[in-house]
Amino acid sequence: MEKANIEKFKKKLAEEEKNILAELTNMAAQDPTDKNNWVPKIDIDAEGMSGEGEDAMQTITYVKRIGLVAQLETRYNNIKKALQRIKDGTYGVCLISGKKIELDRLNANTAAKTCKKHIDEEVDVI
């Protein structure tokens, strides 16, 4: 891959990493024993509510955050791995076939680990 493209993707990945980290930090805390794991925060500021209403609101917020945090955490970790592949010189190479990942695929998903042919297998690739 051309150096200009790599720099473009590196910049996009770094910006997305920053944005996702801000979102994660707002709604979750990093597990001190596993830096790749984020635990949703529980809001204790349910102003104007008391007792069961407050507990119910906190529960609803927490349940919603579980799914959001899981999605953000996965994306964040994939971005970190993509940035590492840039450092290693393997960015843009399919982790299954070893062939180049199509540019339109990388434009759609800068952290893509596979080419279009292996897109359905990407979830299984570390």
Image (spheres, rainbow, N blue to C red):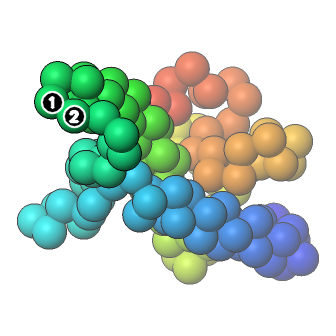
Q: SS of the residue at dot 1?
A: loop
Image location of residue 64, percent across then percent down: 39, 28
Image location of residue 54, percent across then percent down: 25, 32
- Disc 1 + disc 2, Cβ < 8 Å: yes
Quadrant for the C terminus in the image: top left
Q: Is residue 44 above or below residue 17?
A: above
- Most extreme residue toward the left is 33
Q: Amino acid at mark 2?
A: Ser
Q: Nearer the viewer, residue 46 or 4?
A: 46
Mark 1 → mark 2, Cα distance in angstroms: 4 Å
Q: Is residue 42 above or below residue 116?
A: below
Image location of residue 51, percent across then percent down: 15, 30
Image quarter for residue 26?
bottom left
Residue 36: image tag: none
Judging by the rendered image, the residue that carries numbered circle 2 is: 50
Judging by the rendered image, the residue that carries numbered circle 1 is: 51
Image location of residue 116, percent across then percent down: 72, 29
* Residue 79 visible at all: no
Q: Residue at x 77, y 48 (%)?
A: 106
* Residue 42 visible at all: yes
The residue carrying pointer 2 sits among few (fewer than 14), some (14 to 19) or many (20 or more) residues within 10 Å by Cα, namely few
* In this rendering, position of residue 107 left or right of residue 68: right
